[in-house]
Amino acid sequence: MGHDQPHTSSASVEAALARVQGGDVNAYAEVVERLGPSLVAYVAQRCPPQIDPEEIAHEALVEAYQHIDDYRLGTSFLAWLCTIARHRLIDACRQLRRHERKVQRLVEASLADDDVPPPDMDEQVHALRRCLQQLDDELRQAIESVYSQRKDLSDTARHARRSVSQISRRLAKARELLRACVQRHLQDGGRPDG
């Protein structure tokens, strides 16, 4: 394990883990209470702003519980948790990149004046255009600046009088809202929102 993992070792945690392995499901609450904050801190140090570190830590704690019989008493449970959390975070980052690439393709297709989207994207582009109009002004301006006007993040941030980090978070939020909105429109068959 790496040296940058939080260090929380305690006989009471080890005793609780032994009870959990012995069938005492309630003892896991003590483990979560003692190690949960350290695990969240570990994940938060590695987590992009679009991913909730508490959710990743929760997934790791659930997975560790589901495989508690694989844990060897006397070894570092926190190190084991951190390894599980790191794998969950890698999976979440991959999924995030896939969603961002898809949304970026849709945004670019909907904002391109001269380009005709492929026939299978017509419905998605139409839904995306409607969803773009529903975004609040600041989010829509960030999307248009980066994707339509092809400005880089620093230019967009300077123009909006925001930090690059704030613009990056706005873009991530806008992409997530657009993804959900487009998905909703496609599932509803393109019916107008009521």
Image (cartoon, rainbow, N blue to C red):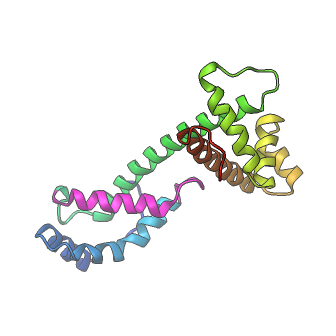
Is residue 4 among what the camera can see? no
Lateral position of residue 123 relative to residue 47, left or right: right
Residue at 63 percent of width and 50 percent of height: 177
Which x, y percent locates residue 84? 34, 53
Which x, y percent locates residue 138? 80, 54
* Magenta-tinted stretch: 45-69
- Residue 13 in which image quadrant: bottom left
Lateral position of residue 137 relative to residue 32, left or right: right
Lateral position of residue 130 relative to residue 155, left or right: left
Residue at 62 percent of width and 42 percent of height: 191
- Residue 166 in which image quadrant: bottom right
Which x, y percent locates residue 54? 46, 64
Q: Any magenta on residue 68?
A: yes
Is residue 27 among what the camera can see? yes
Which x, y percent locates residue 14? 22, 73
Total marks placed: 0
Relative to 140, say whether 75 is above or below.
below
Q: Farthest right residue?
A: 159
- Residue 105 in which image quadrant: top right
| Between 104 and 9, the one nearer to me in the picture | 104
Secondary structure mostly seen in magenta is helix
Q: Any magenta on residue 107?
A: no
**Where does the N terminus fall, quadrant-wise?**
bottom left
| Between 183 and 39, the one nearer to me in the picture | 183
Residue at 85 percent of width and 44 percent of height: 155
